[in-house]
Structure formats: C-alpha cells, structure tokens
Image (cartoon, rainbow, N blue to C red):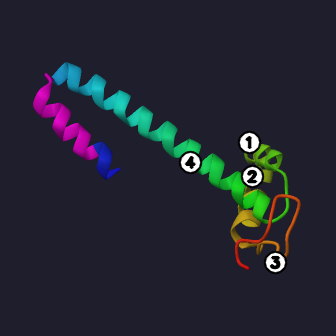
Amino acid sequence: MALAIALTILLGAALSIETNMLALGVVLVVICVLGALLEFFASIHRLHDIGLSGWWLLLSFVPVANLGLALLLLFKPGDPETNHYGPSPHV
C-alpha cells in the first residue's frame, strides 16, 4: 500500500490529472494482482505443509467451504515429519 501511495505521488507530479487517475488505476491493479498471486502461492505452500494437495485451494471459491479452508490453514499444525511434498521446515 505504501508503494501505491508513493507511486501515486510520483505520477501526480509528473502527469496531468486525467492521466494521473488512469495511471493510478493501472498501478493499483498491478499491485492487487501481484498480492493475489503471492497469497495464492503462499496458500499452496501451506497446504503442502499440512500434507494436502494445492487443488484444495479451489475450496476457497465455494461459499461456506472457504471458511473451513481458512480455519484449516490458520490453525492446523504442519506435519512434523516428511510428507509427500518434502521434509518438514521445522526440523
């Protein structure tokens, strides 16, 4: 968010008002897409940490099941031993 604000200030100084709003919109879309990709990959990594496939992330698009998935990702401890996806990072 701080990056978006800094870029907005820089763009506002360099561009006119109309172009500034368009540039701000483009910058914010790019930042949101990058944030969504980071969250996507972190969630898949967390699912692998608890021994599940990344395909379980599709539950995030099901209205009530996404709450269960969020709770699972937040509170289930990772596998203490090596699983199908590799060794435990806590060893």
Residue 70 belongs to magenta span: no
Q: Earlier in the sequence, mark 2 or mark 4?
A: 4
Q: Quadrant of residue 8?
A: top left
Relative to 10, is 59 on the left or the right? Answer: right
Q: Earlier in the sequence, mark 4 or mark 3?
A: 4
- The nearer-to-camera label among 2 and 4 is 4
Mark 3, secondary structure of its residue: loop
Q: CA distance from mark 1 to mark 2?
A: 6 Å
Query: Which label lies toward us, 4 or 3?
Result: 3
Quarter of image, res 28:
top left
Residue type highlighted by circle 1: Phe
Q: Which residues are magenta?
A: 5-16
Q: Residue at x 74, y 52 (%)?
A: 66
- Where is mark 1, residue-wise? 61
Question: Of helix, strand and loop, which one carries label 2?
Answer: helix
Q: Name the residue type under label 3.
A: Pro
As helix, strand or loop, the secondary structure at mark 4 comes to helix
Which element is circle 1 on?
helix
User: Which residue is situated farthest in the left direction here?
Assistant: 13
Crowding at label 3, few (<14), some or many (≥20) Cα neighbours within 10 Å? few
Q: In 3D space, how far apart are the residues under numbered discs 1 and 4 (Cα atoms)?
A: 17 Å
The residue indicated by pointer 4 is 38
| Amino acid type for the residue under numbered disc 4 | Leu
Instruction: Tell me if mark 4 has few (under 14), some (14-19) or many (20+) residues whose alpha carbon lies within 10 angstroms of its own.
Output: few
